[in-house]
Image (cartoon, grey):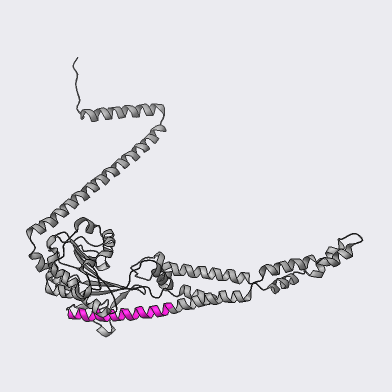
Amino acid sequence: FMFFVFLSFVMDGRNSMLKKGSLRRHSAAAIFPNLLSVCLMMLCAIVAASSVDPSIIEAVSDDDGISVEDVTSSGLSKKAGTHADERTSSQEPMGAATIKAMQSAHEIDEALLFKIEATFAFLCIFYILTYIVGRIQNERTFRCLARALLDCSEELSFEHIGVQSTDQPISSRKLLYRDGGSLAFFFASGRRCAAHGATVSISLKPRYELFALLKGTFFHSTGDTLKVVIPYEANIQPLVLLLVKKEILPAYRRQLPHVELFCDQIQMSPQLKGYLSSNGLQDSDFVLAGDSVEASSLFTIDRVGASLTHLRRALQCLHITDRGAEGSEPQAHDYKKLILLTVDIGHDSRMVASEALRLAVLLSDVLSKWDSGRSAAGIERSRALRRKVLEVENKEKEHQRREQLAERADAKKRDMDEKVSEMSREEQLKYEEKQRRKELKKRTGGAKKIIKL
């Protein structure tokens, strides 16, 4: 049983230490299964200690030279009186009573002990089976999505695909960068309208962690998601656009402060409502927000609308921004102008992955042409919002700078007061005279006045 518990503890290497080159840090949810395994091991040790065989106690007592007869004889030799034999015959020996008390304290129902051990053994075996089955399922999903993204990237004319050298054939090339058993990255670059490449992050549920799955049944947890990040051209005018489901809009507002600053809710065009309400999906499930009213016209392009129709049930968020995105993928850290598309991976994961990458690349293609047709009023409104936000940020920075200067001055004054308190009386008088002259010079501006008598 201890072997099964220990095996469940060390099974998942990702929870014990970070892998070399890992992109994530420890989290409480990841360490929780291992901590629970340690608790199971400790509980098992306690149960084992409480089920000590009483014969061991007798054997130890015999080895130490303590016997019932010895204790009895030594006790009788110290008795005095005419009724000593009668009292000892009716009284149980002291050593035997002590041993029986120890036996009763360590006795445990063998049937109950068997049930406890069987329960823990079943949990450990179930944990191991969950790990194996979950790993296999996630591996199959990763391979399926990698194959779909590879086919779509070749169709979209990306030259460099995967995380290994392009000299190797596609069949033997590593397509995904793996970070544990539930996170992987796909890279593609070498396309004209996506000069900085595309990053696709695949985040699956930790199906191999039993306790993480149990936690997801009681608390809100995200499912299998796929996120596409593409930096777009730098000559595009200021733009922040967000098409997101209502239920996750508060989370995006907390995660991305510029959404709260720049985005106002925009009325959807009838054409966009038609794309999103196909097959019973109501347009009220989504919110369109942006820094310009005309941003909705981007979705009136036929090819964009067709891709939205394919992704209408899987779409979580479509975000176009020139303010960057905190927590985005490593390839996009140095870029502010990004296209971010997040979708749920359902049963038809191949289609969802292909359409998500195709939609993100399509937006990077048509964005430049759409930007050239924007009205001057819309562009000016976007710029005015940024100027206003910049003024507020500058005021906050100036306020913080003044607070820091005041703190430094106070600290310097406290240090000087301590030094003055340690001076002698003559040194204090000289210091006070020097400070008066300095204050007088500061008031007069350094000018010397000559008074004629």
Residue 120, can we see it?
A: yes
- Residue 240 figure quarter: bottom left
The residue sitting at 13% across, 68% down in the picture is: 270
Locate residue 351, reporting x and y percent: 24, 79
* Residue 430 lies in the magenta-colored region: no
The residue sitting at 30% across, 40% down in the picture is: 406
Left or right position of 191 against 91: left
Number of numbered discs visible in the structure rendering = 0
Left or right position of 223 against 63: left
Q: Work out whether residue 304 or residue 7 is closer to the camera in this orientation and state it.
A: 304
The residue sitting at 15% across, 73% down in the picture is: 305
The quadrant of the rendering that contains the C terminus is top left
Q: Is residue 285 above or below residue 142?
A: above
Q: Is residue 431 above or below residue 408?
A: above
* Residue 141 lies in the magenta-colored region: yes
Q: Is residue 134 above or below residue 439?
A: below
Q: Work out whether residue 275 or residue 264 is closer to the camera in this orientation and state it.
A: 275
Q: Which residues are magenta?
A: 130-155
Left or right position of 69 against 116: right
Q: Magenta: predominant secondary structure element?
A: helix
Left or right position of 130 against 242: right
Locate residue 356, reporting x and y percent: 22, 74
Q: Is residue 403 above or below residue 317?
A: above
Locate residue 101, reporting x and y percent: 72, 66
- Residue 180 figure quarter: bottom left
Locate residue 34, reporting x and y percent: 46, 69
